[in-house]
Image (cartoon, helix red, strand yellow):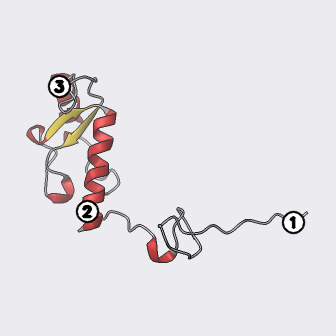
Amino acid sequence: MEVRTIAKVCNVKGCPDIAIGGGRCAKHQRIPWEGRRGFEGYKGDYLKARRQTLKEEPVCRICGINPSTTTDHIVPKSKGGSNDRANLRGLCARCHARRSQAQATAARRG
């Protein structure tokens, strides 16, 4: 028995081309955000500053409701920010995801 895959059209409104990955055609593929790196530089001193930040800021600094579960670089590392405690703030997962998404979108736009 032969299994066939059905070709899908690009997710971008009005584009008739065939999607190749992520629901988009070759012309509309998203460019990975170059500012985003793996976890290089997130060791030693950063881990100490992270623990300190979460201890000092148990509630998210953006929403003020949920507990802080992650640390956020106020000035992103991709823009020259450091892992110093002064550049970190505690955020809940939801607020951190929103901020990261906004930064990624802004970086793609240039």
- Image quarter for residue 47? top left
Q: Residues within 10 Å of mark 2 (few under 14, many from 20)?
A: some
- Disc 1 residue type? Glu
Give the mark, 1 or 2, whose residue is nearer the N terminus: 1
Give the mark, 1 or 3, whose residue is nearer the N terminus: 1
> Which residue lies under the disc numbered 1?
2
- Image quarter for residue 97? top left
For the point 74% across and 65% down, the residue is 5
Residue 78, label in figure: none
Q: Nearer the viewer, residue 36 or 10?
A: 10
- The quarter of the picture where the C terminus appears is bottom left
For the point 51% across and 67% down, the residue is 24
Give the mark, 2 or 3, whose residue is nearer the N terminus: 3
- Residue 13 image position (x, y, % from top left): 47, 67
Q: Vertical placement of 59 versus 108: above or below?
A: above
- Residue 67 image position (x, y, % from top left): 27, 23
Tell me the CA gap for discs 1 and 3: 58 Å
Tell me the CA gap for discs 2 and 3: 28 Å
Helix or strand or loop: what does disc 1 sit on? loop
Q: Is residue 84 left or right of residue 35?
A: left
- Disc 3 residue type? Glu
Q: Nearer the viewer, residue 29 or 42?
A: 29
For the point 13% across and 57% down, the residue is 80
Q: Vertical placement of 51 versus 84: above or below?
A: above
> Which residue lies under the disc numbered 3?
57
Q: Is residue 4 left or right of residue 95?
A: right
- Disc 2 residue type? Ala
